[in-house]
Amino acid sequence: MSESRRTDDGRESGLDRQIAFLEGRRASKEERRAAGDLTGQKARNSAERLLTRSTSGAIYAVVTLACLFCGPVTTTALVIAQAWLCCSEFFRICRMGGRMPNEVIGLAAAVLFPPAALVSGLLACALVIFVMLMACACWYVFTPRASVADVAVTAFGPLYTSLAFSSVVLIRRFDAGLTGALVTLAVMLSIWANDAFAYFVGSALGRHKLAPRISPSKSVEGFFGGIVGSVIVWVVLAVFVVGDMSIAMAVLCGLVVGVAGVIGDLFESRLKRGVGVKDSGNVLPGHGGLLDRSDSMLFGSMAAFFLLLFGGIL
């Protein structure tokens, strides 16, 4: 009987030690659990972020493709919405930096540039610029609290976002049919390919920082990889869509548009770093703001428009 008791006591003691060990182990993980630092939590969070990013990216791509192929009018409607959002996010960054832009003037101009580009091209855009500058001048004259810096960001916001974005409309309007849609899509694809190739090449081979103080993740190797991606898309466009475009012209377009896209990306990164924010907004879950998504497109599409115009394609 005493041996049976000792055995039971031993089992209970061992069970107690095991329970105490498990409780101690659990308690040691509470701090990491609260911080979301456990392996399972990290894996789940990564999967959720990937799903969110992929879903919002797919919706963005589908809407963009549908508007492009439906015609110049739907493309203009899409660009109006995007330009308004980008300009609004730009003004948000300016306010965080201590500036007080006149959003009524700036956002009104942002809405007017794309339809002006559709109706009468650059001439109508020049008229919108004139009206916007006159409105800014009147606001500055009759508003004592307004500073020159406030006027400057008010005028620059729609020029940087909406006028640059209107390049997509200017490219799409030259041909209302399938060719126009394909050329516009190729311009956008070249900029997206630039970003994608830069990311993958930079992740695999990146050793030298391109602009460490502005965008530490960008590398020189990724930069050249992105240029290759942009050139490939333009060469495909020349071979299969635009017969009047030579291979040399396609390579030149790929180089210039690729470089312009990188400058646009770094410019927006510098804006955000200046006020200490990671994203310009949260309209696209997993991607940040629309300005984050479109920063390369703004400068890249503008460069593409002038190259196609002076190259006799448009």
Image: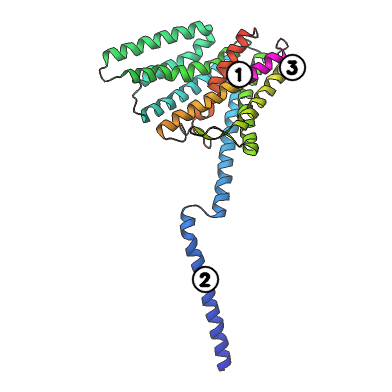
Secondary structure of the residue carrying tag 2 is: helix
Q: Which residue is mark 1?
A: 256
What residue appears at the point 33 percent right and 24 percent down from the top-left corner? 100
Q: CA distance from mark 3 to mark 1?
A: 19 Å
Q: Nearer the viewer, mark 3 or mark 1?
A: 1
Most common SS among magenta residues: helix
Query: Mark 1, residues whose alpha carbon is within 10 Å: few (<14), some, or many (≥20)?
Result: some
Q: Earlier in the sequence, mark 2 or mark 1?
A: 2
Q: Residues within 10 Å of mark 2 (few under 14, many from 20)?
A: few
Q: Position of residue 24 (x, y in %)?
A: 49, 68
Write down the region rendered in magenta.
244-256
Visible in this render: residue 118? yes
Q: Nearer the viewer, residue 146 or 67?
A: 146
Determine the residue positioned at 51% across, 30% down.
292
Q: Which residue is mark 2?
A: 21
Please state the horizontal and vertical placement of residue 288, each as a whole percent of the image. 50, 34
Label 3 sits on residue: 239
Q: What's the amino acid at mark 3?
A: Val
| 103 horizontally vs 10: left or right | left
